[in-house]
Image (cartoon, rainbow, N blue to C red):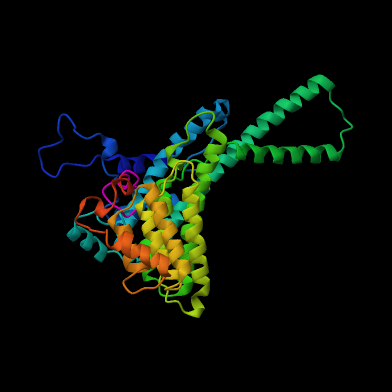
Amino acid sequence: MHAFSSAAAVKVDDEPTSSNDEGPRSLPTVHSRHHPPPIAQSMAEIEELSPPILKSIPGTLFEYTSNDVRLSKQGEYDSGLEKSNVLTQTIEYILRGHAARIPNTIWHSRSLAEQDRNDDIKEDNMNVEERLNAMLQLLRRIEEEGKVFVDLRSTYRCQLVMHDSATASVEEEGFDDDDDESNVIDAREESSWRVEQFKKTYGAEPGPSTSIYDIILDAISVHICNTSSTKDSLHWIRTANDLRLKANARYAKDVQTNMEQFNVDRLSTPTPLTFNAVLRTVANAPYSGKSDEDELRDMAIEVAFTTYDSMFHHRILERNSATFRYMFEVLAKYFPENTQSRGNIAYAIFIACKNEHVLDEDVLTALLEKIAPVGSDHGYEFDKWIERDIRKRFNPSSPNLGFPLNFSNMKKTKRHDKRSATY
């Protein structure tokens, strides 16, 4: 047990206390897994927990030992998750504390009472960009720890296989004093090859979780609204897309190597937020349409449509109302107004939304106010469709908004959080 584990575990595993002095109920009515995750409530706590993680030597927060070689593949994988669990939860706890201090994140409204939050922020000199960089540092650190774990595991496994192979060779053929240098080189090459194979067959490295990526992605999506330069906007769009790719790559590793033996771990399974936060980042990026922003426009369109397509082809995820709302906002921001091509794309997105049964008021508002406001011209067929089938039918106060039930009967079921349409 590492010295890091015990102090952090106390912070993470604390049960929420009652708001009065009556104590907890004798018979709980809500299972603990339905409680909201704990959030670091003060900067003092964040500053206490972060340095021991960031300053630690790679491979010391949780480690693969020679005893783990004796485990089965599933046992070895489960052992890695168990060893990394305290670190994972601690970093999630810290990140939620950071995110709670960034206005408009999903954690901001769930944290402290407004007055307590304001009092705490007065003592906090970090701006949002510094806070995001601190969050990314913690992510990189736990990614590094997971990589070292798998590297060490692969080395142990390789040594065991090479030792058994060498022992068998000696028993069968005897020892040859005339082995030349080429045999030594061949052995080294075989060893390197085996190490790489063992790395590929482990699955997702222990440590990072989808929740870690999601917390940071949500924070980036609200911060990008306040960027002051095209360079900054490009940086945060690129960063958000990289985080999505990393999160999805972890899931792909688990599917590729572990699906046949046992269930893929939920910590590596992406959520709708993992994709929709990237779309929200692109939709929120400042863009005025000037010629010096062509690179931003091109990257924004590429990232948005690639993310949209990846979500459609994902094994377990489904697009939801937030997906289509942000796609309409991206389309309105980066494509020329009053063009037939924009109308055609908007129509295709709406049909996809209808087929997913997730039409809601936010989607319709984005379509009517951002894509096709009154007086816009996207071609006769599109404009006729908007007026006849959308604008005249849309009634926010009527059941199902004035559309057939099967247009929207899954809108809450597919949300990341059924209480909110943000993701």
Query: For the N terminus, which image quadrant?
Result: top left
Q: Is residue 59 visible?
A: no
- What residue is at 55 percent from the left and 29 percent from the top? 73
Can you say whether 288 is above or below 383 in the image?
below
Q: Residue at x 34, y 56 (%)?
A: 47
- 24 relative position to 3: left or right: left
Measured from the top left, where is residue 368 in percent x and y? 32, 65
- Side of 423 where 241 appears, left or right: right
Residue 284 coordinates in the image, percent (x, y): 38, 66
Image side of residue 9 versus residue 182, left or right = left
Which residues make up the magenta segment?
A: 410-423
Q: Is residue 63 visible?
A: yes
Closer to us: 171 or 93: 93
> Is residue 420 in the magenta section?
yes
Question: Which residue is at a point 87% across and 28% down the rendered structure image?
Answer: 176
Quarter of image, res 43: bottom left
Q: Residue furthest right?
A: 178
Q: Nearer the viewer, residue 302 or 166?
A: 302
Farthest top residue in view: 171
Which quadrant of the structure image shows residue 410?
A: top left
